[in-house]
Amino acid sequence: MHKGVCWLDGRLLPLERASVPVLDHGLLYGDGVFEGIRFYAGVPFLLDQHLRRLRDSAQAIALEVPWTEAALTEIAATVIRAFGGKEGYLRLILTRGEGPLGIDPAPCKTPRLIMIASELELVNPAARARGIRLITATTRRLPLDGLDPRIKSLNYLNQILARIEANQAGAEEALLLNGQGHLTEGTADNLFVVQEGRLLTPPAIDGALPGITRGLILQLAEELGIEAREQSLTPYDVYRAEECFLSGTGAELIPVREIDGRRLKACPGPVFQRCHQAFRRAIQQHCAERSDA
């Protein structure tokens, strides 16, 4: 097992020795943004898209990113080399930086950049192979006029409360509803359902993060000739679905076999399997292209 490494304030450190000051506003108030990035064969997957979303999230909260894409790409390469493993997970974090107590961000003059390389296994292999169990959480997704889900912020307490519900129910994951009763996403992944051969996923306007893996799956489905679209969904739509699966950078693609005690018709189903195979091919192609560059 490879031990994690961390790039912090311009230094590479073993993960267990990395720490931030207690007055960092990312720690005190969740004032910051982040990205999770998988790397395969030593190549960060869809890094450009992740860096673009990081910059968009930072701009939305008026947080400066004083590093160029080229600099962040080089830091990622350095961290991956130091990690030593060919596959793993990068966590790129940008905080407001240090400041006095109090939520006013103005005194925070220097943003802090943290990049971690480590292994990540959101679901154990046995559960992934058989399909996972979901519950619909009583915890509701924060409304768009409260915190726009397109901002990938450090504030994850909403999702953590839903994951606690999943743990207490003996399920691997929880789905969150918005205030109107529409499904949004899981605690760390996007939702897909299959109805009559069509692939459906909740729109961002309902409270879902427009995930980068989600976008890739929609693109791959189109290439495969699978009708795919965004559509508002309720628990009823999942209960009667032919298939259901989750997607995310950390999750990759995970089939679902049960939700709220109801077994789905197929797990893993044919649409999932086609999408999963295309996803693995996309990874191989991306890594081959970047390795040759």
Image (spheres, grey):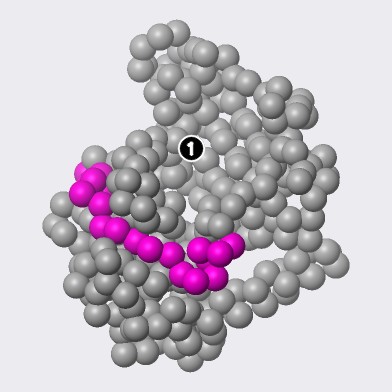
Residue bearing the label numbered 1: 33
Judge whether 224 appears above or below 213 on screen: below
Residue 109: x, y in percent? 53, 17
Does 96 appear above or below 50? above
The structure residue drawn at horizontal position 48% and vertical position 91%, both measured from the top left corner, is 225
State the image quarter where residue 28 is shown.
Answer: top left
Taking the view exactly as shown, the residue that stands out farthest to the right is 292
Q: Work out whether residue 92 or residue 240 is closer to the camera in this orientation and state it.
A: 240
Task: Categorize mark 1 by other alpha carbons within 10 Å: few (<14), some (14-19), many (20+).
Answer: many
In the rendered structure, the answer to whether residue 93 lies left or right of residue 193 reads: right
Check residue 137 for magenta coloring. yes
Q: Quick check: 287 above or below 268?
A: above
Q: In front here: 290 or 71?
A: 290
In x, y percent, where is residue 173? 39, 55
* Residue 81 in sight here: yes
* Residue 27 part of the magenta-drawn span: no
Query: Please, what secondary structure does the residue beneath circle 1 have?
Result: strand
Residue sitting at the far left: 180
- Give me the residue at 53% from left, 56% from top: 123
Give the magenta part as a residue range.
Answer: 125-145
Is residue 148 something that shows in the picture?
A: no
Residue 233 point in image, percent of width and height: 24, 69
Q: Is residue 30 left or right of residue 85?
A: left
Is 137 left, or right, of 226 in this rendering? Answer: left
Report which quarter residue 265 is drawn in: bottom left
What amino acid is found at the position of numbered circle 1 in the picture? Val
Q: Nearer the viewer, residue 212 or 141?
A: 141
Find residue 18 and report its horizontal and vertical position in percent. Answer: 68, 24
> Residue at the location (67% across, 47% down)?
119
